[in-house]
Image: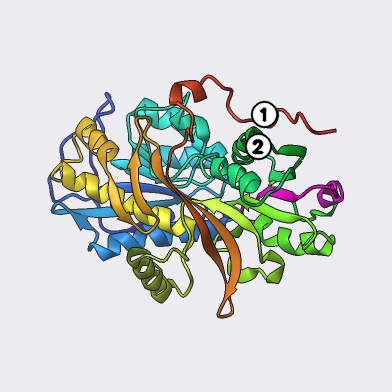
Amino acid sequence: MMRRRDFVIGLGAGIGLAATGRWTLAASKDPVKIGFLAPMTGGFAQVGKDMVDGATMYLEEIGSQAAGRKIEIIVEDTQGQPQVALTKARKLVENDRVHVLNGGLLASTGYALQPYFTEKKVPMLYPVMASDDLTQRQRSAYLVRMGWTSSQPSHPLGEYAYLTLKHRKVVTISADYAFGYETIGGFQRTFEEAGGQVIQKIWCPLNTVDFAPYLAQVRRDADAVMTLLVGQLSLRFPKQYAQAGLYGKIAVLGGGTGTDEFVLPSLDDSALGYVTALHYSAALDTPINRKFVQTYRSKFGKVPGYYSETCYLSSRWVAEATKAVGGEVEDGPKFLEALKRVHVTDAPRGPIKLDEYLNPIQNEYIRKVERREGELWNTVVKTYPDVSQFWKWKPEEYLKQPLYTRDYPPCRFCG
């Protein structure tokens, strides 16, 4: 007797996949199957749990059904590794016969998965994986993203840092992988176009435990340090930054994952004043978000972060598309088109719609870590409405530029 691995929520029966990649029609009583990829073990396990909690919470709210069909979510552990994620995606598609793939964490995983689900003609939702080029130069007809591109929040942050915060010289410290390159690249481009200078670019491994060697390199004439931190790096950096004697002397900016709500309860006052950018904050003062935060907190005993909100929305995305096709998700092309046409006006983050490249146009929030009633929150200090992945450039002009990488934009002011 075969044993299903990892986590299964709901009841399911098999649905056949023809050699052409199209789903064969099954009885309407069979469930709609979502294959969900998340790091449930390893250094990113807490992030993975937040992702799954958000995704399952929405399904529970709708009774795990839409258009008369049960919805089943099958969770596979990627361990935070691209090749493991690819193996698990194969299992979900070829063994479990899922109708849609969902989830994933690291940008490098986003790039690794794209050829596979495109070849198999299985739609995949990217609520978290922010790899820029997958909705730009390397876009796939089967990729629908309701999350973001890595550089999308960084573009307004670069402008804000120069125009509002009056920073003129910035040092960057980032995790040394694709997500870091794209986040830092987006910031550097708009910050320097506004008139600022990035004077150092420092890269650290994803498994960094001791930041002291990197912090010792920081030029003391900088106005701010721009960071991109994820997972355990987010927990370690603030205290070590303060221990290096930099807190209060050189301001800290960052990508939104560095102060996500999953990490805030573990931080102390050494994170106060950090300014980050992202398309969500649990502190958003809207009726919809207040209700979302209250429900999530009562259910899981914690404040929801970006990882939970975006995966909550991804489950809604599947449900909305299922309703749009009257439950006929076995009609692959029809279901795919429905996924592309979803437009949500009342998400916890605010309104969201897809551009022609299937990436969200949405609000980006400048957030500042502050203490409220004994808790740290990402207080929203400015909203940039309707931000696209191309910022203020025309798509055709933007796409003529290289992808943001470790060496692009070049560090013209380093030395």
221 inside magenta stretch? yes
The amino acid at mark 2 is: Gln
* Callout 2 crowding tier (Cα within 10 Å): few <14, some 14–19, many ≥20: many
Residue 43 badge: none
* Residue contact between numbered discs 1 and 2, judged by CB atoms under 8 Å: yes
Task: Give the residue at x 86% y 46%.
Answer: 217
SS at mark 1? loop
Apparent side of residue 258 relative to residue 64 in the rendered image (left or right): right
**Which residue matches tag 2?**
188
Q: Residue at x 18, y 34 (%)?
A: 331
The reply to whether residue 1 is visible in this rendering is no
Residue at mark 1: 409
Question: What x and y, as percent, mark residue 41?
Answer: 56, 56
Give percent across and percent down for residue 159: 59, 42
Residue 197 visible to an observer of this rendering? yes
Query: Does residue 316 appear left or right of residue 202 in this picture?
Result: left
Asked whether 304 or 88 is in front, the reply is 304
Residue 106 in picture, x, y percent from top left: 55, 44
Q: Which residues are magenta?
A: 213-231
The quarter of the picture where residue 81 lies is top right
Residue type at mark 1: give it. Answer: Pro
Can residue 214 be found in the magenta stretch? Answer: yes
**Relative to 103, is 109 above or below?**
above
Of residues 70 and 178, which is closer to you in this image? 178
Q: Residue at x 69, y 40 (%)?
A: 176
Q: Is residue 178 above or below residue 371?
A: above
